[in-house]
Image (cartoon, grey):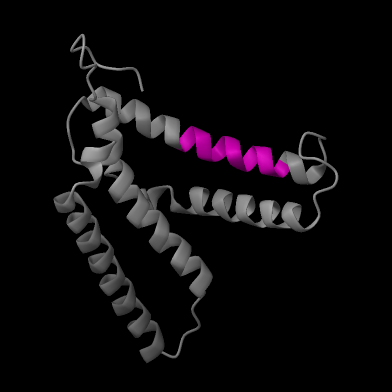
Amino acid sequence: MQPAFHRKRLAAFGTLMTDATVSMLDQWKRFAERDQPLDVAAEMLCQTLGIAGQALFNIDPSGESHTVGRAVATVNKLLSEYLSTPFPPLSIPTPRSRRLQAARRTLDQVVYDIIVQHRQQHAATGDLLSMLLLTRDEATGSLTPA
């Protein structure tokens, strides 16, 4: 994975983050000009998902952002609750653990779908996932299973 963190790639990630932040702040300015309320937590989650989607998978996750955002928010909330009240264990099928597992399955499915799409493209797109999927075994030269 080291090539993914080469200085040039890190600089590109910095540019990606800066451009996304400027765009978000422009949107926020329009909300402020119209004196409209803004859910900053939801905005920041969408921002984070967008940047991660571009950097890790070279995708625009905005089509999935509602589903992914809801699942991430659920996981964050339930794990935070669990850290403050770790009983019963998550292995016990309580409503909390069931909701957590459902949210995790949603996130897993989104990631697996992205992996399938990348494997079908079989192209270097500069994101971390394509680099991992195109990694070759140094001894045999064959693609390594990811």
Q: Nearer the viewer, residue 9 or 106?
A: 9
Q: Is residue 122 above or below residue 98?
A: above
Side of 24 where 78 appears, left or right: right
Q: Nearer the viewer, residue 42 or 1?
A: 1
Question: Can residue 102 be found in the magenta stretch?
Answer: yes
Q: What residue lies at 36% left-to-right and 90% top-to-bottom?
A: 33
Q: Nearer the viewer, residue 115 or 66?
A: 115
Side of 38 where 28 appears, left or right: left
**Residue 99 screen position, x and y as percent:** 71, 44
Region in magenta: 99-110
Question: Can residue 70 be found in the magenta stretch?
Answer: no
Most prominent secondary structure in the magenta stretch?
helix
Location of residue 85 by image quarter? bottom right
Q: What residue lies at 21% left-to-right and 24% top-to-bottom?
A: 122
**Residue 18 screen position, x and y as percent:** 25, 68
Question: Is the C terminus in the top left, top right, bottom left or bottom right quadrant?
Answer: top left
